[in-house]
Image (cartoon, rainbow, N blue to C red):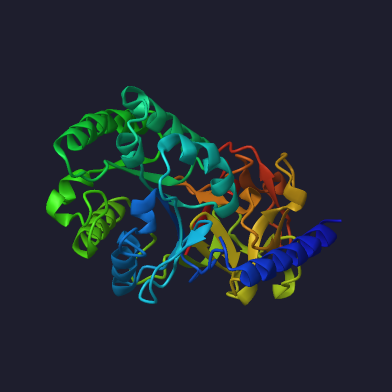
C-alpha cells in the first residue's frame, strides 16, 4: 500500500512539474545542492524588487565562498545565474497577516531548518492597523515555531523607509521586536533577533522602499553574520553542511545499519557490528538522516508515530516523519513523533531492529556519529 502511494505521488508530482513548465507561471526551480534547508520569508524585499534575487544573491555567494552547503526553499523563484538557488517565499506587497495565513502549508511542504523572516514593511506602507502589527508578528512567529519546532527562526527588524512619517512608523514597529523575540527565546524557542534596520540607511534605497544593489548586499552580510552566530543554522563551513559516518549506539556498541547495504524502499534498519560498510554510513543535515548515497532517508514505517514502530528507509520526500533531531545528550528524536531511536529490549545482538520508543534516556537510545 505504501509503495503504491509513493509511486502515485511521484507520478502526480511529475505531472504537476510538467504542467508548470508548460505554463511557466509560479513554478519554483526546486534547486538543491543537498544542504541545510533555509527559507527566505517576507515580501518584495525578500523577492528582490528592483534587484531580482535581492539579498539572496550576496548571501548565497557568501555560503559558497565559505564552503557551506545551503538549500534555499520556497514556492517562488527568481534571480540571476549568479544566485545558485532561486527558491524563496518573498511575496510582493504582502503584509504580516497574509504571510501568516499561508505559513503552515509552506513549512509543511518545504520543512526548512532555518527561516529568515523580514516582514512588516507593507503593514507600514498600507497603514494597516499599525498599533497591532507587533501582535500579528508575534502570532506569526508562534505559528512558525509550532509547525517546525526545531527550526532556527531569525526575525529581522525591517529596513528604513523614505519619508519622515513612514520612517517614524518603522521605528515604532521595530521597537517592539526585541521584546517579542526575547519572550520567545526565553520560552525555549529557537528565535533570534537580527537588527536589519541598523544595517541600512535611506541612501541604500532606490525608491524609498527597496534597497539598491549595495543595500541588498548589506542585508546579505547582516543575515550571514547572524546565521554564523547560531551553530548548526547553516551547517559547518567546508563540511558540506553535514556530518557523515557511522551512527553508533552507545549502549549496544553496534552501528545503525541497512541489511546487506540494501537500498530498496521499506528496508528496516537494524544494528550490526561497525564494520564500516556503506550501509552504515549516514549524513546528517537540516533534520535529515540520509543513508550513505544520499538517496534514502530514515523513516517511520507507514508514517506511524507510536511507540514500537519499526524504522526503515524510504525515498526522501520531506515528510515530518523523516525529520530527526540529534540532541546534546546523544539521543536521536523523531520531530513528528517525539520518540527516540531505540533498540528493542536494550538488545545488543546483531540484526536487532531499530524502533521508536519514548525518550527515557536509556543508553540504548544514545548514539554517536563520526
145 in relation to 9, above or below? above
Q: Left or right: where does residue 306 sit relative to residue 255?
A: right
**Residue 225 sits in quarter:** bottom left
| Horizontal and vertical percent position of residue 290 | 58, 64
**Quadrant where the N terminus is found in the figure:** bottom right
**Residue 322 sits in quarter:** bottom right
Disc tally is 0
Query: Which residue lies at the image location 73% right of the left edge and 57% below the top edge?
Result: 352
Query: Which residue lies at the image location 63% right of the left edge and 68% below the top edge?
Result: 23
Query: Which residue lies at the image location 73% right of the left edge and 73% below the top edge?
Result: 262
Residue that sits furthest to the right in the current view = 1
| Horizontal and vertical percent position of residue 201 | 14, 50
Which is nearer the eye, 138 or 34?
A: 138
212 in relation to 335, above or below? below
Note whether residue 28 is visible: yes
| Horizontal and vertical percent position of residue 3 | 82, 61
Which is nearer the eye, 162 or 253?
A: 162
Note whether residue 295 is visible: no
253 in relation to 190, above or below? below
| Horizontal and vertical percent position of residue 268 | 75, 60
Q: Left or right: where does residue 369 sit relative to residue 53?
A: right
Q: Left or right: where does residue 100 sit relative to residue 178?
A: right
Query: Which residue lies at the image location 71% right of the left edge and 68% below the top edge?
Result: 14
Amino acid at each position: 500500500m505504501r509503495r503504491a502511494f509513493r509511486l502515485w505521488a511521484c507520478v502526480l508530482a511529475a505531472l504537476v512539474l510538467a504542467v508548470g513548465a508548460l505554463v511557466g507561471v509560479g513554478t519554483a526551480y526546486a534547486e538543491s545542492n543537498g544542504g541545510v534547508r533555509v527559507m527566505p520569508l517576507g515580501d518584495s524585499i525578500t523577492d528582490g524588487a528592483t534587484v531580482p534575487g535581492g539579498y539572496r544573491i550576496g548571501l548565497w555567494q557568501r555560503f559558497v565562498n565559505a564552503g557551506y552547503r545551503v538549500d534555499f526553499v520556497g514556492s517562488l523563484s527568481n534571480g540571476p545565474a549568479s544566485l545558485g538557488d532561486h527558491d524563496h517565499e518573498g511575496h510582493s506587497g504582502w503584509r504580516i497577516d497574509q504571510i501568516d495565513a499561508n505559513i503552515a502549508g509552506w513549512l509543511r511542504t518545504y520543512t526548512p531548518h532555518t527561516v529568515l523572516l523580514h516582514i512588516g514593511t507593507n503593514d507600514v506602507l498600507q497603514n494597516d492597523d499599525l498599533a497591532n502589527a507587533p501582535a500579528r508578528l508575534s502570532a506569526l512567529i508562534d505559528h512558525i515555531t509550532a509547525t517546525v519546532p526545531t527550526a532556527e527562526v531569525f526575525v529581522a527588524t525591517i529596513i528604513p523607509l523614505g519619508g519622515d512619517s513612514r520612517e517614524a512608523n518603522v521605528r515604532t514597529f521595530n521597537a517592539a521586536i526585541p521584546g517579542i523575540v526575547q519572550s520567545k527565546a526565553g520560552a525555549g524557542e529557537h528565535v533570534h533577533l537580527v537588527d536589519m534596520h541598523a544595517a541600512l540607511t535611506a541612501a541604500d534605497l532606490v525608491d524609498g522602499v527597496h534597497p539598491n544593489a549595495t543595500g541588498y548586499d548589506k542585508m546579505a552580510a547582516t543575515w550571514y553574520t547572524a546565521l554564523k552566530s547560531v551553530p548548526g543554522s547553516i551547517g559547518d563551513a567546508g563540511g558540506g553542511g553535514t556530518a557523515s559516518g557511522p551512527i553508533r549506539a552507545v549502549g549496544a556498541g553496534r552501528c545503525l545499519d541497512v541489511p546487506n547495504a540494501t537500498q530498496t524502499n521499506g528496508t528496516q534498519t537494524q544494528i550490526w557490528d561497525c564494520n564500516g560498510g556503506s550501509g552504515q554510513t549516514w549524513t546528517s543535515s537540516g533534520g535529515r538522516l540520509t543513508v550513505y548515497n544520499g538517496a534514502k532517508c530514515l523513516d517511520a514505517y507507514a508514517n506511524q508515530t507510536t511507540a514500537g514502530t519499526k524504522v526503515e528507509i524510504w525515498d526522501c520526500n520531506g515528510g515530518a516523519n523523516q525529520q530527526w533531531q540529534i540532541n546534546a545528550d546523544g539521543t536521536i528524536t523523531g520531530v513528528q513523533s517525539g520518540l527516540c531511536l531505540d533498540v528493542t529490549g536494550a538488545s545488543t545482538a546483531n540484526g536487532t531492529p531499530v524502533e521508536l520508543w519514548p525518550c527515557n534516556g536509556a543508553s540504548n537510545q544514545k548514539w554517536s556519529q563520526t
